[in-house]
Every structure is written in structure tokens, then in C-alpha cells.
Amino acid sequence: MTTKETLIRNLKEKKARIAILGLGYVGLPLAVVFGEAGFHVTGVDPDSRKIDCLNKGTSYIPDVKTESIEKLVKSGHLTATTDFSVLKEMDAVSICVPTPLRQTGDPDMSFIISATEELAKYMHKGMVVVLESTTYPGTTREVLLPKLGAENGLTVGEDWFLAFSPERVDPGREDFTTINTPKVMGGITEACSEVASAWYEGAIKIVHSVSSAEAAEMAKLLENTFRMINIGLVNELAIMCERLGVDVWEVIDAAATKPFGFMKFTPGPGLGGHCIPIDPLYLSWKMKSFHYNARFIELASEINTNMPRYVVSRVMEALNDRGKALKGSRVLVLGAAYKPDIDDVRESPAFDVIGLLQKKGAQVEYHDPYIPRIHHETDGWHMESVKDVMKSVRDADAVVIITNHKVYDYKAIVEAAKFVFDSRNATRSVAKNSDKVVRL
Ligand SMILES: NC(=O)c1ccc[n+]([C@@H]2O[C@H](COP(=O)([O-])OP(=O)(O)OC[C@H]3O[C@@H](n4cnc5c(N)ncnc54)[C@H](O)[C@@H]3O)[C@@H](O)[C@H]2O)c1
């Protein structure tokens, strides 16, 4: 039997030992899916708090149930460690580490590089490695391949196998989760795709193979760039509608009645999360090395980045219409998460909105049922979520809805507030007191 055939057999029989590098929003659900499919999974993460939690059988990711972790830990299908040397025992490794941006807006590849360097120490014949982190096209071949293969004297496609498979997790979503969201898989060679697909097909319903790692990397960037650009488009539509005196929400709902050729996107106070505001910039950064300016991305990014400023200027105008200056006014920001019903604040526009309101002299408070405190690293401020949200609503000169969490009683909020600026159309069904509400 060749190395490839042996590995495929072990993967199909679930005898192959699996490691997940990086146990965050992406890596932990993936570890659970593989564990529940019958693989023995070892999670490796330098964050000892996460490892302690898992080994005690508890989850720290809202989408992953503690009962699932408890069951997997008890049955021995999931173990977790900070010790990378376990990798020498592994047959299949999936890398799910962060890919943020640097302060300068360039890709921060340090996590991929450090995970690759750790893994390189323990590479051996008969291993398959899949990179899941969103990154620029070429990363798998240019960064992982030489470090893991040639530098260890291993031939890719024969001695070991390497592929890229973008994660598509949508935190908070219940209809499509890791197990039933199709996975794109692109290997460095055909044999790499074959081995990596054999592995993932053992746990995930649909694996769609493409001809190269670059095609898979680019597919992920297309998905996220598509969202970013369409959000940029509706954000600009909101600005245009306001000038025209037209209700943008009504326009979007009307357009969305078309059963074909239109997809609904909604405006908001700015982009958030770890993917949509960041990933397209990985592509535009890469294209610069080809002397190509990714214009759609640049334009959408400019519009989206300006939305917090636009929201604050609209709050200021609306207060002015009510005979009040923003300076000195009490403003309550509702929601700090970047999207509803989750506890993730990464890249949340709430930070920019709060910072800008403060710079204009407003006395700002915030409330988020899922996020007890926030801090802005660069600007150096800390805030605690207000304890009694309805009291703060009553006391505020302006309530600014940034995240449309379902748990809020918008009817009661509008009734109690002096004025509400709604950047998410969260108050759409509140008919009473509509004169108190200004929508984006
Ligand atoms: N969160 C999402 O919704 C989402 C969706 C699709 C794709 N992605 C992409 O998936 C990747 C991971 O994102 P995430 O949201 O899971 O990030 P995360 O920050 O939640 O988790 C990453 C984990 O990697 C660990 N880590 C850091 N350096 C490491 C190393 N050298 N070795 C092992 N572990 C290391 C961190 O401690 C952390 O626990 C990113 O590229 C992201 O763009 C995220």
C-alpha cells in the first residue's frame, strides 16, 4: 500500500489521529464535529484557559454546547493541550488560527507562521495538513508548503498531503453549522485533495473539491468580498435615500420581493466580525504585489469604514432638531457585539461609534446583554455595560441602537426613551411613538 492509500484507509476507518491547531470560534466546532463523527481529536492551543475549560468538559463558545464537550471528553474523543509535541503522534492536522490585520491594514500572518513553525518540528511521513484560516491566495503553497515539506525532506503528494479548506462558520446561526455547510477543498496536488477530502467526508456532509489550493483560497475571498461590497452598496444607498427623503428600509424590502436576481443586504453602523471587514483586504493587499488595485474592495471598504462617522453625524443632527447639542448629552449605545445575539465584539462598529460620540463631548454609556465590559486597546478606554438598561434608556437624551439583539423589548425601549436612533431597523414593528425614532 502507498502512503496515500494507507492514510486514506485510516481516515475512512476513523483510526487516523486528528489534531486541530487553534480552538476558537472555528477550531472548536470543527473539533466537535470530527469527535462526534468518531475520530479521536486532540485540540492544541497556546491559550491555557481554553485548554483547562475543555479538559473540565466545558465550552467557552456559545455555538458549542457544554454537553457536547463533556460527552466527547468523557468518551476520550476530545482531549486538549498546550503542548505541541503531541503533533508527532498525529496523522491529520487542521490549522484554524487567527488572521487579523496589522495596525497598518496589512495581513498579520504571525499566527499562521507560528503554528506552521510548531507543526514543522513534528512533521512526518503519512500526514495530511489542512489550512482553514482565511488568508490571501498563495499562502498554502508559499508559506506552509516549503516549511512543512521541503525543509523536512518530505515530498508533497507522496509522503504527505496539504490542502486549503476555508471555514464558513457563521456564529449564532442554527440552520447551517459546520456539519451541514458544504466545505470547499483545494489540494496542492490532486492526491492532496483526495486525501484531505477523504478525511473531511468522514464528518462533513458535502465536500466540494477544486483543482488547487489557490482556487479554494480565492473562493473564500469571493464569498466575503461579495458580502462586503453588497453591504457597502446598501450603506451608500442608505446615505442616498436620506438625502432624497426616501425610507431605505422600505426600498430594500420592496426590492427583495423580486424572487430572482436580487439578494437582500441591509445597511448598518459599519462592518464587524473577524471576516467581512478583514478578508477582502487580504486580497487587495496581495493584488498590490501584482500592481493591481482592487477598486471594488477599496471603495466598499471606504464607505463601510465611514458608517460609524455617518451614524454619529445623524445622531447629532437629530438631537439638533430636538434643540439639543450632542456635547454634554447622555447617550446610551445599545449593543456592542458586531451582530445580533452573539458575544463577539471583534471589529464591532460599536467601538468607533462610542469613541466618536465621546470625542464630540457626549456622556456615553452602553448596554449589551452578552458583553459585560468592553475596552478599546488603541484609545485606552474601558466601559462596563449598564446594570439597569431601562433606567439608562429613560435617563438618556439619545438611545443609539447598534446591535439588534433579539432579547431587547424595542416597544418598551421606544416608549421609555426620549429619542432613539436606530441603525438596524430594530424598531420596525413599533408603531407607537414613531416620532421618537430616527432610522438610518
Ligand atoms: N469566527 C468566524 O466567524 C470565522 C468564520 C470563517 C472563517 N474564520 C477564519 O478562521 C480563522 C480562525 O478564526 P477564529 O474566529 O476561530 O479565531 P479565534 O481567535 O476565535 O481562535 C483562534 C485560536 O487560535 C489560537 N492560536 C493562536 N496562535 C496559535 C498557534 N500558533 N497554534 C495554535 N493555536 C493558536 C488562539 O489562542 C485562539 O484560541 C481566521 O482566519 C478567521 O478569519 C472565522
Image (tube, helix red, strand yellow):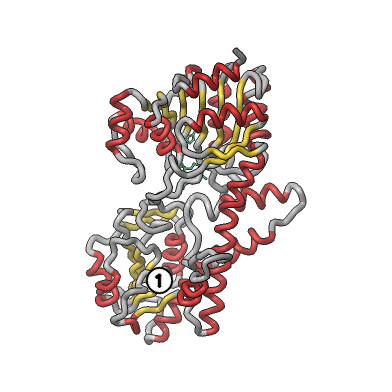
User: Mark 1 near ligand 1 (CB under 8 Å)?
Assistant: no
Is the residue 32 above or below the residue 16 in the image? below
Provide residue 440's location: percent of width, then percent of height.
Answer: 45, 74
Q: What amino acid does circle 1 point to?
A: Asn
Check the picture and name the quadrant holding the N terminus.
top right
In which image quadrant can residue 130 be found? top right
Is residue 418 placed above or below 262 in the rendered structure?
below
Direction right: furthest residue: 291
Q: Residue furthest top?
A: 1
Where residue 174 appears, x then y in whole percent?
37, 49
Q: Is residue 72 above or below residue 439?
A: above
Q: Is residue 370 among what the camera can see?
A: yes
- Label 1 neighbour load within 10 Å: few <14, some 14-19, many 20+: many
Whole-percent x, y for residue 100 in the image: 54, 46
Q: Secondary structure at mark 1?
A: loop
Q: Residue at x 56, y 52 (%)?
A: 278
The picture places residue 37, in percent across and down from the top left corner, at 40, 30
Picture layout, residue 362 above or below residue 141: below
- Please state if 403 lies on the left or on the right of 265 as rendered: left
- The residue at 64%/64% (across/down) is 299
Q: Is residue 124 left or right of residue 420?
A: right
Which one is nearer the viewer's eye here, 170 or 4? Answer: 4
Q: Quadrant of residue 191?
A: top right
Residue bearing the label numbered 1: 425
Nearer the observer, 47 or 235: 235
Q: Nearer the viewer, residue 252 or 300?
A: 252
